[in-house]
Amino acid sequence: MHSGQVKKIINLSKLVLAVVVLSGISLIISCKDTGSSGAGVGFKFPEQGQSFGLGEEVKIALDVPSGTNISSATYTLDGKPVGSKNNGEGVAISTTGLTLGYKLITAVIEADGKKDTLTTNIELRSGVKPVQYTYKIVNTYPHDTSAYTQGLEYHGGKFLESTGQEEHSTVRWVDVKSGKVLQQTKLDGQYFGEGSSLVDDKVVMLTWQNRLGLVFDAKSFKQLSTFPYQASMEGWGLCFDGKQLIKSDGTNKIWFLNKDNYKEESSIEVYNNTGPVDRLNELEYIDGKIYANVYTKNVIVVIDPKSGIIEQEIDFSGLLPAGFYKDEVDQANNVLNGIAWDKAGKRLFVTGKKWPKMFEVKISPKS
């Protein structure tokens, strides 16, 4: 992401972590408060916040005090009905085909003639250990070292590249072989440019913390319109799967946007086998999968867009020679970021922020 922002990001991350922890505590307290009815009915299982592997069966049962009569119980998972009983008996639900992350289980019960609502949360996690991949350099090409690369795509023999930093953010068409900028426009100085993607005859581009997206004519780069973010708080990476725009916001969440009005229509949470993977940054859609840079790491993860499971991790360590940036701040900021796919030629390109080279690579499983 962002040059000159390392300390700021670290402090912000600590703040966000604190907020998340406090929010989590608040959520648990809240759910525990509503996890039992006035009649003393509560959830016997699952336990609050209990984790399950995606595909596992989740058993739901009520803890009903002696003498309490349950005449009906209706269960939902994230608002969708998953079962009902005319008594206090439990139900079992399948998690196959669901997405990862926290899910809200609700039970609407009628006990002794009174209705009440109980809630609890579970977490669905990935049980898949990502296959580890490495790379081989096929070709190298020049890359503009002033380009703080935020978005990268390949279209018709050219790169569509968006760059960041206040007062220096651009969207541009770049010649592949020479690295020469063929055409560009500079963003207003207030914007910190982020990911971009070509949708039909328009270029859609994100800004970092302005909570605003920009739309340009793809030929002239004339700005046509803007659009606000909704639930996502920041703009990081962007790509297009042919039907929807796919957006990252610096968390472990991926958002799917309507390609015409840019409204957020759905989202997934991204996990590997050890837990959620956040700081997802630049994105590319390749053969039905989402490829994502993990900010500040020499890793690109390959994500199943239906579930959020990370299926592969590609280790790009050593791609840029060690010690290329002597300054520690530059070294920390100018990281791997930029993925472009030549669909017709089956070529994969990667680069980094202010890197001197664009690399064409082939990937293969680690031996």
Image (spheres, helix red, strand yellow):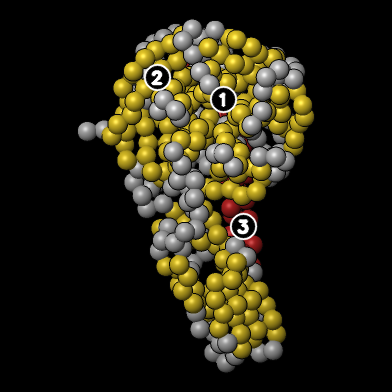
Q: CA distance from mark 3 to mark 1?
A: 36 Å
Query: Please, what is the three-letter code of the amino acid marked with disc 3?
Result: Leu
Where residue 152 sits: x, y (%)? 54, 23
| Front one among 246 and 89 | 246
Horizontal side, residue 63 vs residue 118: left or right: left
Element class at badge 2: strand
Where residue 287 sits: x, y (%)? 44, 38
Res. 27 mark: 3
| Front one among 266 and 6 | 266
Q: CA distance from mark 2 to mark 1?
A: 16 Å
Where residue 111 sits: x, y (%)? 64, 86
- Of labels 3 and 1, earlier in sequence is 3
Q: Which residue is mark 1?
A: 151
**Residue drawn at 71 percent across, 17 percent down:** 220
Where residue 23 sits: x, y (%)? 62, 50
Q: Quadrant of the N terminus?
A: top right
Element class at badge 1: strand
